[in-house]
Image (cartoon, grey):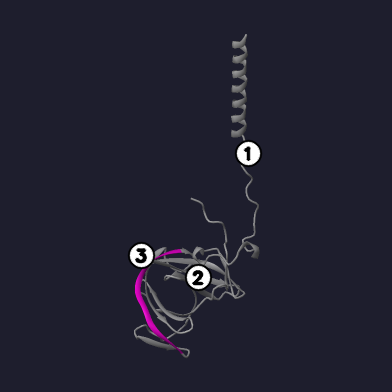
Amino acid sequence: MVAVIVVVAVVLIAVAVVRALRSRSGTAPPPPPAPRDPFDPGESTFGDPRTLRAGDMVELLGERMFVRGSLRLREGGYQWSEHFLDDIGGTRTWLSVEEDPDLEVVRWTALKNSDLRPSAAQLNHDGHDYRRDEHGTAQFVSEGTTGLGSTGRVEYVDFEGSGGRYLSFERFEGGEWEVAVGERVPPGTLTVYPGSDPVQP
């Protein structure tokens, strides 16, 4: 009699374990997160400019601009990014983001029909002096709309002025020099609104 009771108890325990396992395996997955507005000011606390990519929006000193395309540049072991922006009026500027070693974000505006050339050690533009700082050649990968091929080469010459001012020359694939003036973006004045969640691997 005792043996029968033991067998029945073992069977009941086994049945309970099987039911518990089936119950766990049949648990419904958690519901997906609720949709959110990526441009809701509550969704960003300034953000990280190092994560910028095509499709994002930025707000700089109250002005909102959309990232149309990005360049990822590499020279040896050094990397930086340039992001091409359009504001609501269609004006095109760009942001450079680099760590050298501190994070530095600069807003650039192209100089049209400029006769400036990067051959001198020092240049003057609009009453500001700039001294030659860097010169090199980098490889780039293009994302989104940049007007360039998917990959290529760019030669650059950078000049630095006082008060966070810069002057830059770039020529892509040996073409004509493109000239731009830049101003360092003060900390806390740039807000990043991701256009979409990053693609998970």
Q: Is residue 30 above or below residue 94?
A: above
Which kind of residue does numbered mark 3 sit on? Gly
Answer with mark 1 or mark 2, whichever residue precedes in sequence. Answer: 1
Asked if marks 2 and 3 touch (Cβ < 8 Å), the reply is no
Which residue is labeled 3 in the image? 77
Which kind of residue does numbered mark 2 sit on? Phe
Which residue is labeled 1 in the image? 28
**In percent of the image, x 43 and y 68: which residue is there?**
80
Q: In this picture, which residue range is highlighted in magenta?
A: 128-142
Report helix, strand or loop for mark 1.
loop
Q: Quadrant of residue 27?
A: top right
Q: Residue 166 at what x, y percent from top left? A: 45, 81
Q: Quadrant of residue 57?
A: bottom right
Answer with mark 1 or mark 3, whichever residue precedes in sequence. Answer: 1
Answer with mark 2 or mark 3, whichever residue precedes in sequence. Answer: 3
Report helix, strand or loop for mark 2.
strand
